[in-house]
Structures are given as structure tokens and as C-alpha cells.
Image (tube, rainbow, N blue to C red):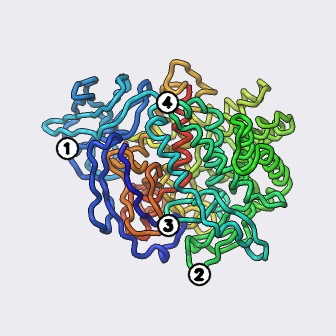
Amino acid sequence: MMTLPPIRTLACRTRPSRWCVGLALLTSLYGSVQADTAGTPPSSTTVSVSLPAGPLMVQVNQVALERLGPKSAVVEYRGEMDQGSYRVTRLGRVVSSGPLRLLPAFDAWGNGRHYFELDFSSVRTAGRHRIEVQIGALKASSPYFEIQDRALFKVTAARLLDYFRKSRHLNNQDRRIRIFETERYVDVWGGWRDAGGDTGKYLSHLGYANHFNPQQASMAAWTLAYTAHTAAPLYRQAGLLQRAVSEAFWGADYLHRILDADGYFYTTVFDKWGDAKAERMVVGYEGEDGRYTKQYRSAYRAGAGMAIAALARASMLAKQTRGHGVFSADTYLTDAERAFAHLQEANLSYCADGKENIIDDYTALMAAVELHRATRRDSYLEQARLRAEQLMQRQAVDGSFMSDGGQRPYYHAVEAGLPVISLAHYLEVEPDSVRAHRARAAISSSLQHQLRLDQQVSNPYAYARQEFRLFRDGKLAEQTRAGFFIPHQNETGYWWQGESARLASLSVAAVLGGRHTEPLASGNFGTTERLAAFAQHQIDWTLGRNPYGISMLYGFGARNPPTVQESAGDMFVGGVSNGITGAADSDSGEGIAFAPGPDDSQWRWVEQWIPHSTWMLLAAVTLSRP
């Protein structure tokens, strides 16, 4: 892997255009995982990224593939021939070869291309590999990539942990800041800055839109505590355990500080994305212009559910390691129990629309499950059962989930896999066979629905599609649609950034869910070939097997997203960019785009954001465990 110096970047994920004037972007080509082609960034210039126009291209995961797992590449070709060949080489020697498989016609992302697939799952040699293809007289090669056991974790985990460490928020200003529309001052020091140049700290945002809350800092804290606790041997073997444990306690300490004496968590520490005229405070906000609101008390769906889960898991980690952060294992657990008790009474009052939805269900389910694990109290198991039942009642006959009472399909740009993941965790604590059977059936139905949805249209990259209803003029459209990317016309009014976290969450869901519903000890990742391939394909997209041939994981792969030379923040190795979206001018998210400009909109694609690296780390651990 190539070690790169930090490059300044401006984070504008929730920032209106007026705050992003004058960005200067760099394009940069970096070496492969082993730094075989170490490129030098050109001088600062404004760029837009277009689909490659070459006549023959090989798109593959440029970072790491599991030795015993599914492995495939997509070949894009402009021409008239319908057959070709490939070979996979290692150290100059051919380890696999064969014909390319022509895929069904696909023109959703532009005409004039033919797509082929080559499956090289039979390659089980560890080391550095490359693919060479030939169609007629045309020849092309892929970037180099690594094949090994526990590949994703071994190659990326150290740098993913670096990303969290470098994203720590250390400004002492946060030791005493005001709560909106009060004269109360509180200590909210620590935690992680949310993204690139955004020094705000969020358990969640978009609460005003009700159905889009992403789990942000609390999901990061839980992922670190959960993986350090349950996958300690994996971290230890890589020499990373103490780093993972330290980062987990850093997150738990921050959650303790933002838990108010009344029992609620502060949702956001915000200053309108660094606006010099805005007071940094504990406050809610909404919309593209960051209007301050009183909605700073977190509902389950606004990060509180996962914060409770993180604190409960941190208490278990502290007892296992006989260590802790600033605060103790008992403090973490007391915090989690107090916050859960408070939200059992107050959650509805913290929801923007006064109603719970599916996000409340799966995050509260995670909270109850983790509290049961930490305390072994039956009362928490009963609460988990209630939430699991409510979640499953939101499932339609075809296996899809509904966000509300049955009108709005559940779709999410960040954590689409969490309904299944929460049920998988619930299964690990549920002793009742009848209840467990129902949960397994719900998981299976959801996963099969996803596979069917992906196969309803030509889909050369096996991208996870989603169902949605457009939101216009204050109401949902009657028609349910399906597409590849998040629609631009949605309840947030402006938010439709790339989906790197969503894809990793679905990968985790397929593996965890598959191990419960279709376990296969000899299979890839412990489940069936179909689910394993689905899981791998979603990670592959983020790591370079996409039409742009760009690895969104900075510092890894042959090509990374364009970066910003002058800004208010940093772009770190181990950070994951938002990623690819539908065309910028498409209300329904049709077409395809990556960093097309203008500069003040490039955050949608280029920005590094904490949920992306969080979900990539969870995927790396999940896919590496038996």
C-alpha cells in the first residue's frame, strides 16, 4: 500500500453552495496496493470526472480479494465482437485463463458498450495478481490486486483505524459550549469530526426528514467496541488490538459526555460547517442552509439507539480487557441503562413527526440486545422481542421493508443492511425456537428480495438496487420505483450523496444473515455462493470494480477520487469517499455520475465521511471471521 501525505479537502456534505465557493480539485493517480505505479499529483486545477472512453477496460477490485472467496471482474468493450479471452497472472505466470462471458445488453449508464464477466474464483494462490484480456486485436490489463486469506481485513484494517485516530476532534473549545436557546454550558469534548473539513460532530443528522437518519458517531463507537470485543484474536494477530480498543473507548467517552443529566443524548455539535458568524453549540439543524432548531435531543433513530448499544458493548470490552477510557465499565453500562430507560418514555417526543419508524425499531433493537448481553437481564430480552416483532411487522409479503405503516418503502443511503443485521444480532440472544424461526424467516425473505430485485434488470456490476417513492411538493408519489441509486427527489430536499456505506452495510447483512439462514461451513464467508457473491460485489464496487475504475478507499488501488489542495480539512489514507451517484440532473437517480462538477457540489462524490470507513471496517471484520 502506498503511504500518501494528507491532502487538504473541503467537506460540504450538508453545506450549501455558498459555503463552497472556490474549491480547487486535483486529479491524482496512485499506485496499486503495493505502490507499483506511484503517481505524482498534477498541479492544482478544477476537474470533472467522466466515464472512461477507452475501447477495452478491465474493472476489478483493486485492493484485496479473499483467497477462498468469490472473485470476478467486469470487462467493458466498445466494438462489434461478442467473444474474447482472459488470463490471470501472478509473477508473470498464468494461473487461470478462459473465455469471457458476454452479459445481457445494458445501456442505463450510456450506449455503445458491451459487458463481459470473467469469474476467477478458482484462483487460490496468494499474492499479487493481474488480469489480461483480449477481444480481437484489442488487449487490456487490470491494475494489480492482492489475493490472500482474510484479505480485506489484513490489507485495510490498520489504515481504517488510522482514519479514526486522525479524525479525532481535539479542540478544547468543546469543553464548554452552549445549548441552543439556553444559558446552559456543557462539556462535549472529544469524539470524531464528521467528515473531511467538517468539524461538526453528529450522532445523526437529517432528523427533520424522518426516514433518512444515518447512524454516525454512535455507529462508529459501536463498531469499534463490538469488533474489538468479539474479534480480538483477529486484531491481535495483526498487531492492532490495542489501537482498536483505544479508539473504542475514545468513542464511548464522548458518548458519556454528550449524555445529558436528564437522560437524552445531544444529537449534534454544530457551527454551520465552520461559518465564522455561527456559534458552535449543541443544536439541531435542518435543510441545506443549516437552520438551527431545538431538535437536539436524540431519538432512537437519531443516533441514541446505537449510542446505547455502543456504551453497553464498551462496558463488556472494558471488563474483558480490564481497561477503560477516561470513564469506567460501570459508568458506560450505567449510562446505557439510564438512556434506554429515558427513551422508553420520551422517544416519541424526540421524533420530528411524533411517530416512530423502522429506524427507531432496528436501532432500539440493537440497544436492547446489547443491554441484554451486558446484563443478562430478562427485561432487556423482552424489549428486544417487542422491537423485533415491530420490525418484522413492517415487512411486506415480498420480503421488502416499509419505513412507516406501509406506504413508504424502506431505502437508505447509508445503512440499508441494518434491519437484517439487527435481526441477526437478536437471533444470537433469543432462546425461544419459535421466535427465532420467525426472525430467520424474516432475514431470509429480505435477502432473497434483494437478490431478486438486483436481477430484475440487466446489472453487469451486480449493484444492489433499491425501491423508493419520489417525494415532491410535500408528499410521496403513488408509484413505487426501483433503481440503482438514491433518488434526488426525497424528503431531505437536497441529500443524495454517494452510497459507499450503504453497500458495505448490505455486504455485512448478507454474510451475517446468510450465516443464520443458509449456513454453509465450507462455503465462502460461511454462507451460500449467491449470498457470498452479493456481499463481495458490493465491496468490490467501492474498491474499484465500477465503471470509473476508481477505488473510493483513499491510498489504496490504482486510482483514487480527485482531491482538494486547499481547504479547511484533510483527506486521510483509510478514509472512504461518498462514491458514485445517479446523474446530477435526474430526479429519480437514473444514469450515473462521479465528481462531474461544479466544484461547489463535488462533496457529493469526493468527501470522506465517517460512516463509510465505519462500515468498511465492520465488513472487513465480518468477512474475515469464520
Q: Quadrant of residue 309?
A: top right
Circle nearer the N terminus (2, 3): 3
Circle nearer the N terminus (2, 1): 1
CA distance for labels 2 and 3? 17 Å
What residue lies at 15% left-to-right and 35% top-to-bottom? Answer: 136
What residue lies at 37% left-to-right and 42% top-to-bottom? Answer: 1
Q: Given the image, on which type of amino acid does mark 1 rest?
A: Gly
Which one is in front, 57 or 20? Answer: 20
Looking at the image, residue 454 sits to the left or right of residue 5; the answer is right
> Residue 114: where, in percent of width, then height?
27, 42
CA distance for labels 2 and 1? 57 Å
In the rendered image of this protein, does residue 364 appear above or below residue 23? above
SS assignment at label 3: loop
The answer to whether residue 456 of the structure is visible from this angle is: no
What residue lies at 54% left-to-right and 66% top-to-bottom? Answer: 14
CA distance for labels 2 and 4? 50 Å
Looking at the image, residue 292 sits to the left or right of residue 66; the answer is right
User: Which mark lies nearer to you, 3 or 4?
Assistant: 3
> Residue 438: where, in percent of width, then height?
72, 30
In the picture of the structure, the residue carrying the numbered disc 4 is 532
In the picture of the structure, the residue carrying the numbered disc 1 is 79
Q: Given the image, on which type of amino acid does mark 2 rest?
A: Lys
Circle nearer the N terminus (4, 1): 1
SS assignment at label 1: loop
Q: Given the image, on which type of amino acid does mark 4 rest?
A: Ala
In the picture of the structure, the residue carrying the numbered disc 3 is 12
CA distance for labels 3 and 4? 35 Å
